[in-house]
Image (cartoon, grey):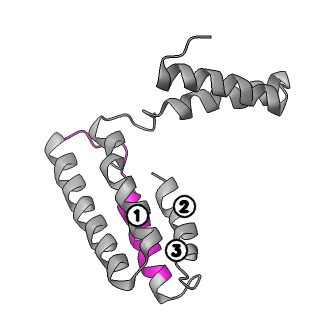
Amino acid sequence: MWHIPYQARHVLWQDGVKYKGKEWLRVISELVEICAIRPFVDCQKTIEKMIGSKRRRLEAVIQYCLSKGYTHAVSYLGHAKPDMFTSIEKRLNGKTTSKVERVMRTVNMRVNVSKWSTAGALNVTKIRLAYYYNGFDA
């Protein structure tokens, strides 16, 4: 979830929005609040209401960006929207559903501890992701 407001800064820059200007602050502050998820909420009805509220707020941000002509932001948020709340819906408590994230943790450890080369780490990552996403076996 932290990726959303962080990367939104870049797409707002692409749209020519002034850094820390009125419009920038409106979008980023709203995204930070939308993406702030309380851990360990265990009531399913509370989770559903919380996600519903956050989805409505996200849609309002997208509509605001659309009205301002921020095409990069609209595209970015539109692509992020379907999977934004998967973690809380599936009660992952900080874990990830992304195969890329899982691979990167292992590769990062091996680069830092075992001193793999950057090229070697890239090759291993490519093979693993090809296996995950394309069924290729090495």
Residue 40 shows in the view: no
Q: Which residue is mark 2?
A: 7
Q: Which residue is mark 1?
A: 75
**The residue tagged with tag 1: helix, strand or loop?**
helix
Is 66 situated left or right of 120 in this image? Answer: left
Q: Is residue 39 rendered magenta in the image?
A: yes
Residue 95 drawn above or below residue 77: above
Percent across and percent down for residue 63 are 29, 75
**Amino acid marked by disc 1:** Ser
Residue that lies at the very extreme toward the bottom in this rendered image: 22
Q: Quadrant of the C terminus?
A: top right
**Amino acid marked by disc 2:** Gln
Name the mark on residue 12. 3
The residue drawn where x is 73% and y is 25% is 123
Name the main secondary structure of what is drawn in magenta: helix
Which contiguous range is marked in magenta? Answer: 24-43
Of callouts 1 and 3, the N-terminal one = 3
